[in-house]
Amino acid sequence: MNTISIVWIIERLLCKTVEGSLTDVVITADWRCNGSQDQYSGTCYGSCSFAPPSGSFTPYPDLTQDQVLGWCFANGVDQTAIEANVSLQIENQINPPIIAPPLPWLPPVMIVPPMLPQVEPPLVNAETPVAAVDEQPVVSDAPAA
């Protein structure tokens, strides 16, 4: 069985255009945690807000996704709990904890696909023109005119 693959993504950053002498200061990051295993997937998303920077400042164009994710984890985003949630979503798809079996007092319903009518193709030999096979005599109860 394959293991669950977890990927964290920063989807959007909200910036305050001016904060003191700084420009484009990130105040909120929208994040997403995606997980997958085979054909199953799970996701969790949220936002994290930040206080104005005190100390070192990285200009907006120099930010990395890993750096911003680090800020999120340092400011209340519980990486372990969220990854456990995404993993549980996938586990619940593989082994559903709640199911809806058929009612025991009703007979089982069997779905049978409809039978398609079998049509035999007309027999044609190499000496008979195909048009002659398709032609049918005209029969009518009306008197000939």
Image: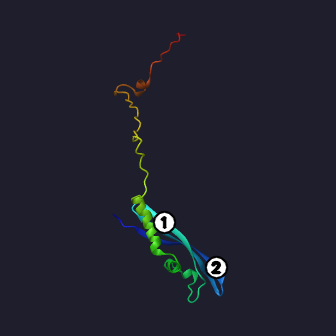
Query: Which residue is disc 1 drawn over?
Result: 43
Q: Which quadrant is home to the N terminus?
A: bottom left
97 or 32, which is in the foreground? 97
Cβ–Cβ below 8 Å for labels 2 and 1?
A: no
Q: Secondary structure at mark 1?
A: strand
Position above or below: 19 against 120: below
Q: Quadrant of the C terminus?
A: top right
x, y percentage for residue 12?
A: 57, 72
The image quarter containing residue 110 is top left
* Badge 1 density bin: few <14, some 14–19, many ≥20, Cα 10 Å: some
Residue 102 at x, y percent in the picture: 42, 46
Residue beneath the point at 38% across and 27% down: 122
Q: Does 113 sit left or right of 144 as displayed?
A: left
Mark 1 residue type? Thr
- Mark 2 and mark 1 lie on one chain; the one further toward the N terminus is 2
SS of the residue at dot 2? strand
Residue at position x 42%, y 67% in the image: 87
Q: Quadrant of residue 3?
A: bottom left
**Badge 2 is on which residue?**
16
Q: Which mark lies nearer to you, 2 or 1?
A: 1
For the residue pair 100 and 74, the one nearer the viewer reads as 100
- Residue furthest to the bottom in view is 55
